[in-house]
Image (spheres, coloured by chain):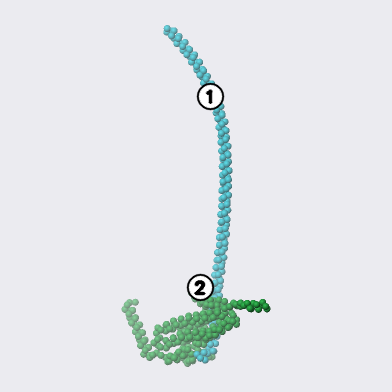
Amino acid sequence: MSKKRKIVSVCVFLCVVAILIVGICLTGGNGEHGDISDTMQDAVLHENDKIDIGFMKVNPSVISAFVVTGVLFVSALIIRIFVIPRFKTVPGKFQMLLESWVDFFDNLATSNSPHKNKFLGAYIFAAGSYIFVGTVFELLGIQAVTVNNASIALPAPLSDINAAIAMGCLSYLIIMSGGITGNGFKGLLLTLKDFSLPISMSFRLFGALLSGLLVTELVYHYMALSFVLPVIVGVLFTCLHAIIQTYVLVMLTALFYGEVSERHPKIKKVKTKKEKMKAKEA
Amino acid sequence: MPLNIDWQQILLHLLNFAILAFILYMLLYSPIKKYMAKRKAMYEDMQKETQDKLQQAEDAKLEYQKQLDSVEQQTALMRKQAESEIATYKQAQMEEAKATADKLVAQAKKTANTEKQKILSSASKEIKELVTTATEKIATKSTSQSVDEFLDEIERSKKVEKAG
């Protein structure tokens, strides 16, 4: 490409950018759609953006959860039918990815709960996959129609408080089941001791994912912020959230599971002299 | 409910996740883990087999080393025996050679003495003969010379008488 042609191309590009900016300023005023507080409230509470699924009205995150489940189911089925039977002793790139994926959660379960980890491994594998794929799913921006006939981009399933509570409480129940099977009544008490765990787990997940959603909503609310910035706040934040929240929840679940299911050896009580004397007399 | 918490939706999420967890366990987690465990077992078997073979090789090496040491010991012993036998044989040979030499010397001496005696007797005999012959010759020579001188004197006296 000659120097003259390069200069012409840059000039044309700058002109297009300038025209677009002028157009944005002239057409949209401030570029705001309604009140930001309403948008934020909708993003948190989903009072006005419910979706009708036939027999009930649900939050958009329920649809997201169904879609994520469907995607994971189809992917798993394809992998099971076409990939796993062709596994080689020396793995290829995709096989390596799958093995690393399973191995990561399995190792996490084994290292945090060495004595009892089969069920835990399966649970954190499913939970980790669900949280990761669910969070990344937000990037696709799949549209749905609300009961008010408004278009809405499906959010991450766990950015809804109900989904986060479901995941947090289920993790707590799994931890409790580990405590009961590992230590019986003592395990139950050990789990109940950390009664704040389901709340903290739920709200940690909800807060982390909601914050990402709110920041993204905030950025998209103003048209002027819709250049370059969404790449950082939208893609990078979402990807980081996906990795961090997956790791945090599965790690906490594995850690508490291992703690409550660990069998402690009974410590024999040392008899005092008086007790020994009494025992002799008896 | 505060924060729009809806138990029905929580249960929906739970049901959804339970189904997903079951599917993922059946379709991915379990088969991949089984495959990995199978491969691990295969490599462990291979490692065990290799260890066994290595151990066998080590044992064989030790056995061979032992045999080698034993052979070396036997060789040393045999060499020692052979050296001892050679020394004994050498000694016997030396003694035999010495005895033979002594015998030969004695025989030679004896032969030499006999020869000497023979030579001496022959020499004395020859000397006797020579002496006899010489004596005879001397005796013969002196007689004939006297006769010759007598005859010569006679002849000369005859010549003088004739001249005279």
- Chain shown cyan: that is B
Q: Colour of chain A?
A: green
Depth order, front residue of A176/A165: A176
Residue at 49% x, 82% y is A245
- Residue assigned mark 1: B127
In the rendered image, which quarter is residue A17 located in? bottom left
Q: CA distance from mark 2 to mark 1?
A: 127 Å
Residue A135 place in picture, x, y as percent: 48, 83
Residue A90 place in picture, x, y as percent: 51, 71
- Using a 10 Å C-alpha cutoff, classify the residue at mark 1 as few (fewer than 14 neighbours), some (14 to 19) or many (20 or more): some
Residue that protrudes farthest toward the right in the picture: A282
Judged from the image, the secondary structure of the residue bearing numbered disc 2 is loop
Type of amino acid at the residue the image marks with label 2: Pro
Judged from the image, the secondary structure of the residue bearing numbered disc 1 is helix
Q: Is residue B29 visible?
A: no
Q: Is residue A115 visible?
A: yes
Residue B27 place in picture, x, y as percent: 54, 79
Q: Chain of mark 2?
A: A
Depth order, front residue of B4/B9: B4
- Residue assigned mark 2: A91
Type of amino acid at the residue the image marks with label 1: Ile
Depth order, front residue of B154/B16: B154
Depth order, front residue of B6/B33: B6
Disc nearest the viewer among 2 and 1: 1
Residue at 47% x, 13% y is B149
* 2 and 1 marks on the same chain: no
Residue at 62% x, 77% y is A272
Q: Chain of mark 1?
A: B
